[in-house]
Image (cartoon, rainbow, N blue to C red):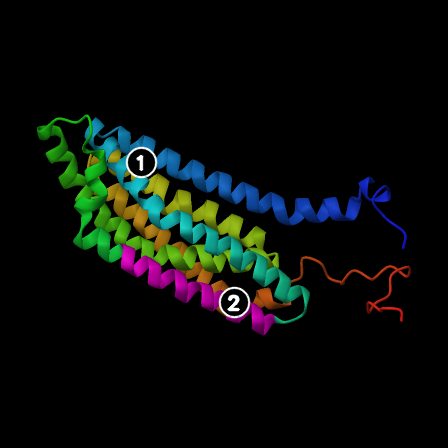
Amino acid sequence: VKSATLSGWRFDGELFYRLIRYGLPNGIQFMLDVCAFAVFVMLVGRINKSALTATSMAFSINTLAFMPMLGFGMAVTILVGQSLGRNEPATAVRSTWSAFYLTYIYMTILALCYWLFPQIFIYPYRVGITDSDFAALEKMVRNLLLFVAFYCLFDTGNIVFSGALKGAGDTRFVMVITVVLSWVVMVLPSFFAVRNAKSLYWPWSFATAYVCILALVFLFRFLTGKWKNMRVIETAPKVPPELPEVPTVGI
């Protein structure tokens, strides 16, 4: 059997084009989404130091929900891509909904904990803060965790359904929708709210609305089924003629 190890290092223009075509929008979407939330935190910081601290604490606590969801989203992307590569869109649909149900159960339990037992998540931040300052922060963070508990239920659909679309190669749609909505629904309204009202809860309302609307858009895109006809790789790779298609054992 001949080895292709030495010849495999050569530049593959078609493969590089696919990496750019599907990978670049995905990278830009993730980068600009992070930038939008960074700008959001900066805007909240213009209110006062307590608002900035409470927001940072709430987002830090939110990682307990976000990071496992991110893992499910990556898994869905891989499974959908593999299923469509085998021309099995029904398997891709089943994988997506299975991930959604599992993630939604986890998020529901965590959201209830944010709502009913917020002190469990807030207490570790007690170190190094005076009693009076911590009491004020605790009240603010408790209120912000209500926002987190609500939008996390929608963020489940956001991560899972966008992951499915990415696995099908619909990365450009995900990028455009994320960038447009993050600025139109969250960043710009938060800027005017902070400038005029100086209230912490108005920006958080816009951030919550952004996550919810984004999830609904991705769900609608998923349900339309257009992604089922997309392929990252249109043709399956052929087995080299030097290799038997079915392994055989000589007797």
The residue closer to the viewer here, 128 or 219, is 128
Location of residue 227 with respect to 213 vertically, above or below:
below
- At label 1, the amino acid type is Phe
Which tag is nearer the camera, tag 2 or tag 1?
Answer: 2
Tell me the element at label 1.
helix
Q: Is residue 48 visible?
A: no
User: What residue do we see at 56% from left, 68% from top?
Assistant: 92
According to the image, label 2 marks what residue? 95
User: What residue do we see at 63% from left, 49% from top?
Assistant: 22
Displayed quadrant of residue 40:
top left
Tell me the element at label 2.
helix
Asked if the magenta segment contains residue 103, the reply would be: yes
On the image, the x and y values in percent for residue 229 come to 64, 67
On the image, the x and y values in percent for residue 230 come to 64, 63
Magenta-drawn segment: 89-110
User: What residue do we see at 20% from left, 34% from top?
Assistant: 198
User: What residue do we see at 42% from left, 53% from top?
Assistant: 69
Point out the residue furthest to the front here: 251
According to the image, label 1 marks what residue? 191
Which badge, 2 or 1, is on the more N-terminal residue?
A: 2
